[in-house]
Image (cartoon, helix red, strand yellow):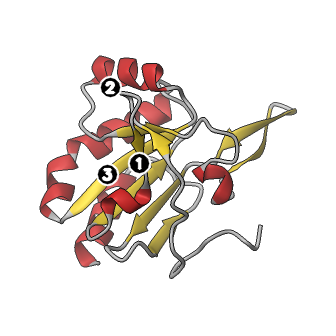
Amino acid sequence: MSNRPGIGDSLPDIALESPDGTPVKPADFAGRKLVLFFYPKDDTPGCTTENKDFSALAGEFEKAGTALLGVSKDPPQKHRKFIDKHGLAAPLASDAAENGLSDALGIWTEKQNYGRTYMGMVRTTYLVGPDGRIARVWDKVKVKGHAEDVLAAARAL
């Protein structure tokens, strides 16, 4: 776990897949701030709320010179359905590849629920500066009020 990139480190430039199938990488956002919010699964209650909260503030993030990107292991076609169903404004990307970005960040990890052990995404948000370095990390995110907290940090960066 200690090799996890942290504050001041460069974000690993590992490609994700956008809902239309094109690759998207952290380096594509060089020169602007980027919020990468990793969440477990499309269309589950907490993840839907988190995506709607970030989407509701998308215009404010834009004004703060900050790009948004929501990331889960869901495939691109599932992201498209999720976006359409909820009218999401925050762009999404799939991190379905083996040894993807969430693996490199150490947030795709063993989880336990009701005595069952499985691999899952730890809800984590990264604020990346225009220089591509991690400025702030929110671990084990609680959804309520989270998008507002991240927006305040983005404005202050």
Give above or below for 51 relative to 155. above
In which quadrant of the rendered image does the C terminus lie?
bottom left
Q: For this view, does 133 lie left or right of residue 122?
A: left
Give above or below for 141 relative to 77. below
Helix, strand or loop status at disc 1: loop
Query: Front-most of 62 and 145?
Result: 62
Label at residue 144: 1
The three-letter code of the residue at mark 2 reads: Ile
Q: For this view, does 77 lie left or right of residue 83?
A: right
Q: Which residue is tagged 3?
A: 68
Q: Position of residue 147 (x, y in %)?
A: 34, 53
Residue at the image point whose x is 42% and y is 26% from the top: 79
Helix, strand or loop status at disc 2: helix
Number of on-image labels: 3
The three-letter code of the residue at mark 1 reads: Lys
Helix, strand or loop status at disc 3: strand
Label at residue 83: 2
Using the numbered discs, state the Cα–Cα distance from disc 1 to disc 2 in whole angstroms: 20 Å
Residue at the image point whose x is 28% and y is 62% from the top: 151
Using the numbered discs, state the Cα–Cα distance from disc 1 to disc 3 in whole angstroms: 18 Å
**Residues packed near mark 1 inside 10 Å, few (<14), some (14 to 19) or many (20 plus):** few
Residue at the image point whose x is 47% and y is 35% from the top: 47
Residue at the image point whose x is 46% and y is 20% from the top: 78
Give above or below for 101 relative to 157. above
**Residues packed near mark 2 inside 10 Å, few (<14), some (14 to 19) or many (20 plus):** many
Using the numbered discs, state the Cα–Cα distance from disc 2 to disc 3 in whole angstroms: 14 Å
Query: Front-most of 89 and 54?
Result: 89
Q: Position of residue 130 (x, y in %)?
A: 31, 73
